[in-house]
Amino acid sequence: MSSHRSAITTHVLDTALGRPARGVPVRLSRLEAAADGAGGAGGADPQTTVLATSITDDDGRVAELGPAQVPPGTYQLLFDTAAYSAASGQDCFFPEVTITFAVTDERHHHVPLLLSPFAYSTYRGS
């Protein structure tokens, strides 16, 4: 394993099966204000810059996801839960889960996902 430490990490736990969710495709993106400066209700959608993609390991974790530092801003983690559900033989009500969160400082940000076929939750981890 490299000495690189990602500023943003995640892990996925399958609460229906009671184990880490192995093989979940994950994408980390940064959201930028629309080029025309519009925003809010009815405004232009923000621009999305993909920073990294990965797949959860045997422990359901993605430890190396993106740069070692990220500037303050709005970020998204997109989880391809349909691919995981198909591989694990479970029903899938939410084919993808997108978690949007704000980075306001240089601390490490860990954003876990608790997943089941018909529900999910998340929190600010450590």
Image: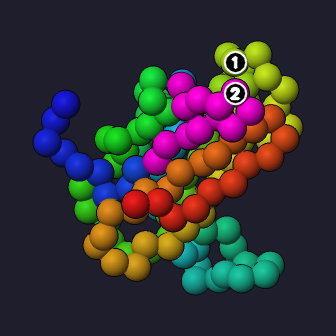
The answer to whether residue 48 of the structure is visible from this angle is no
In the image, residue 88 lies at what x, y percent?
A: 69, 18
In the figure, is residue 90 to the left or right of 121? right
Instruction: Tell me how far mark 1 sits from mark 2, CA to CA.
Output: 9 Å
Q: Which numbered disc, 1 or 2, marks the residue that appears first in the sequence?
A: 2
Viewer-proximal residue, 44 or 111? 111
Residue type indicated by callout 1: Ser
Residue type indicated by callout 2: Leu
Q: Compared to 45, does 121 lie above or below?
A: above
**Mark 1 crowdedness (10 Å alpha carbons): few <14, some 14-19, many ≥20:** few
In the image, residue 93 lies at what x, y percent?
A: 85, 38
Residue to which mark 2 is pinned: 17
Residue at 45% x, 30% y is 59
Which of the 4 image quarters holds residue 126?
A: bottom left
Residue to which mark 1 is pinned: 88
Q: Which residues are magenta?
A: 10-22
* The stretch drawn in magenta includes residue 16: yes
* The stretch drawn in magenta includes residue 30: no
Q: Mark 1 against mark 2, which lies toward the viewer?
A: 2
The answer to whether residue 79 of the structure is visible from this angle is yes
Residue at 47% x, 60% y is 125
In the figure, is residue 55 to the left or right of 81? left
Residue at 43% x, 72% y is 103
Coloured how?
Answer: rainbow
Element on which disc 2 rests? loop
Check whether the beta carbons of the residues at disc 1 and disc 2 lie within 8 A of each other: yes
- Disc number for residue 38: none
Which of the 4 image quarters holds residue 1?
A: top left
